């Protein structure tokens, strides 16, 4: 019994979900017999699912009390239980086939040797030299497809190719050492996000760097497999992870992307693996479709799009078994695919109908920014502000585009509500940049408004923003006066003292 067989029976997505369940320790009360196993698997509901596995002559059958299991599917809970079974000292083995009945003995006198004509071997139509010259002009994708097709009908060829693939990945001493070190370093990701230490991340990142070196030394399949292994290691901790786990995932994705961009692996297999990894981790890179565009090519891109759309339809039709996170992940992949293949127009068709959310509007706006369509960006920003008038993200992006259009007055008007709602040094500086040569007039209005608002508040630290602004402008005496009778942070008091001492020294 192998993980490859489980993946064939369950499918890529279900297998990887089951693998994540097993890694998180959700399989409990495992009982194993010679021909089967039972267990309970904790799902998302309050009650655990009951799983039973049985070995037959040809495969492993699974029964589960979850909605998918009741429909006869080999679900992720069955996969998790099978992996737990395979982790036991006595791994599950497919039963040996029943011995065939011996053929009846025929007396030698009755046996007549058949007349077999001598084989006629037709002369080759193309010489080896000419065939070699032809093959050298073919692209890699064509050669791979021809080899795979031939291997499917010639077992000896298939065995040779599989042996070569195994040796490439499995017989590399450095790869085994790197795998062990990745596993040991990832143990640190188990820590509570509030208590996580940086040591494990340093070791993990250093090992990933050596994985990249492995690829530059020609051991590409091993490097790709190790990068994917690194991502798989972090999957159990991706949900509710700390900052370092997220950063480690980003590093692993980045190395995988770089290696694939340089060596162009099988595009269909790459597309399948990318979708599986994205769904299991729940956090595909923001530039996944674009970053893998070259190694995917047209064939891989078609495969990825079809996989995503098929999974989207399936999840929408079976909502009970899947979470909003699954839908969100697929939606991000759909957005990336649309933006990469059809630009802002395709993204608007996907997201712009009905009432788009703030994030939808921002994604559309950024796609338009890339295409330098600043006027369209401002139109979408203003549409979003009809529902979210004070949103700082929308207003900041809109102001940037207005400045590129040399519409300074409109840019200041776009930013003004942000300063009114949440006065800060950052919003004040944005106003100053937008106003340009007209800033002296806007500056007086901004400071008068700020002083009026501060005077009306009862907070003892109310003048902290004003002190920061005046220090930024170099008005040290004004900052000192604003700080009187005000509770400032130690950092701000230190800055004020250093500014006064510096002024006195000059």
Image (spheres, rainbow, N blue to C red):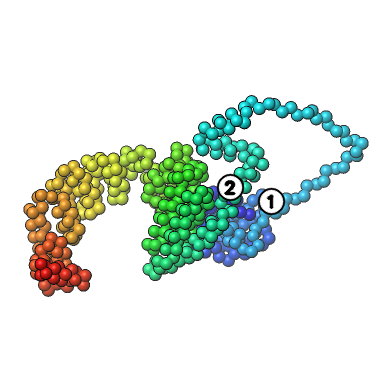
Q: Which residue is mark 2?
A: 165
Which structural element holds mark 1? loop
Q: Which is nearer the N-term, disc 1 or disc 2?
A: 1
Classify residue 123 as left or right of residue 392.
right
- In which quarter of the view is residue 422 placed? bottom left
Q: Quadrant of the N terminus?
A: bottom right
Left or right placement of residue 136 versus residue 155 in this view: left
Instruction: Estimate the x, y position of residue 293 in percent, counting from the top left.
Output: 42, 42
Residue at image mark 1? 57
Tell me where residue 419 appears, x and y as whole percent.
17, 57
Residue 66 shown left or right of residue 94 in the figure: left
Q: Residues within 10 Å of mark 1 (few under 14, many from 20)?
A: few
Residue at image coords 65%, 62% = 90
- As measured in the structure, the alpha-carbon distance from the residue carrying label 1 to the one carrying label 2 is 28 Å
Of residue 223 and residue 151, the one placed in the foreground of this image is 223
Residue 339 is at least partly visible in this image? yes
In front: 442, or 46?
442
Q: Any mark on residue 422, and which?
A: none
Q: Look at the image and tell me whether residue 325 can be seen.
A: no
Q: Give the residue at x 18% y 61%.
A: 424
State the image coordinates of residue 413 (x, y, percent, origin top left).
15, 50
Dot 2 crowding, Cα within 10 Å, few <14, some 14–19, many 20+: some
Q: Identify which residue is drawn at 17% across, 56% down.
A: 429
Q: Number of numbered discs present?
A: 2
Q: Nearer the viewer, residue 254 or 52?
A: 254
Above or below, comparing residue 447 to residue 144 in the picture: below
Question: Where does the C terminus fall, quadrant-wise?
Answer: bottom left
Q: Residue 475: horizontal and vertical position, in percent?
A: 10, 63
Residue at point 20%, 44% (across, down): 404
State the residue in front, 426 or 38: 426
Left or right of 442 on screen, residue 216:
right
Q: Is residue 294 above or below residue 396?
A: above
């Amino acid at each position: 019994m192998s993980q490859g067989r489980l993946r064939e029976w369950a499918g890529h997505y279900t297998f990887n979900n089951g693998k994540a369940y097993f890694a998180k320790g959700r399989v409990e009360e495992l009982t194993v017999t010679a021909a089967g196993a039972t267990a309970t698997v904790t799902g998302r509901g309050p009650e655990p699912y009951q799983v039973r596995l049985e070995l037959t002559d040809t495969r492993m059958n699974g029964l589960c009390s979850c909605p998918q299991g009741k429909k006869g599917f080999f679900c992720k809970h069955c996969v998790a239980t099978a992996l737990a079974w395979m982790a036991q000292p006595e791994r599950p083995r497919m039963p040996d086939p029943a011995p065939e009945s011996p053929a009846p003995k025929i007396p030698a006198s009755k046996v007549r040797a058949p007349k077999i004509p001598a084989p006629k071997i037709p002369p080759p139509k193309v010489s080896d030299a000419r065939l070699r010259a032809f093959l050298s002009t073919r692209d890699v994708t064509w050669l791979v497809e021809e080899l795979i097709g031939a291997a499917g009908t010639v077992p000896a060829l298939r065995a040779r190719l599989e042996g070569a693939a195994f040796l490439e990945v499995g017989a590399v001493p450095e790869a085994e050492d790197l795998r062990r070190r990745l596993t040991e370093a990832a143990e640190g990701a188990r820590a509570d996000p509030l208590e996580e230490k940086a040591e494990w991340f340093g070791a993990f990142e250093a090992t990933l760097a050596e994985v990249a070196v492995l690829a530059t030394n020609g051991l590409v399949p091993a490097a790709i497999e190790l990068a994917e292994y690194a991502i798989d290691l972090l999957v159990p901790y991706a949900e509710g992870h700390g900052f370092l786990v997220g950063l480690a995932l980003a590093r692993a994705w980045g190395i995988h992307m770089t290696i694939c961009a340089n060596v162009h692996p099988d595009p269909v297999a790459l597309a399948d693996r990318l979708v599986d990894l994205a769904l299991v981790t729940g956090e595909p890179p923001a530039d996944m479709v674009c970053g893998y565009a070259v190694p995917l090519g047209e064939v891989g891109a078609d495969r990825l799009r079809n996989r995503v759309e098929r999974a989207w339809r399936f999840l929408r039709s079976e909502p009970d078994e899947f979470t909003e996170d699954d839908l969100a992940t697929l939606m991000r992949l759909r957005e990336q695919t649309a933006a990469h293949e059809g630009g802002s127009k395709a993204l608007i068709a996907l997201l712009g109908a009905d009432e788009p959310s703030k994030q939808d509007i921002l994604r559309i706006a950024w796609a338009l920014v890339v295409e330098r369509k600043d006027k369209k960006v401002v139109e979408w920003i203003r549409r979003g502000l009809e529902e979210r008038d004070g949103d700082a993200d929308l207003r900041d992006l809109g102001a940037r585009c207005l400045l590129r259009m040399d519409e300074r007055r409109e840019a200041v008007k776009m930013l003004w509500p942000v300063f009114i709602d949440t006065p800060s040094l950052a919003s004040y500086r944005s106003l100053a940049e937008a106003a340009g040569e007209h800033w002296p007039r806007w500056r007086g209005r901004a400071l008068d408004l700020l002083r009026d608002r501060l005077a009306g508040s009862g907070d003892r630290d109310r003048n902290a923003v004003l002190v920061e602004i005046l220090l930024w402008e170099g008005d040290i005496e004004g900052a000192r006066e604003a700080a009187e009778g005000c509770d400032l942070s130690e950092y701000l008091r230190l800055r004020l003292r250093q500014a006064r001492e510096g002024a006195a020294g000059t």
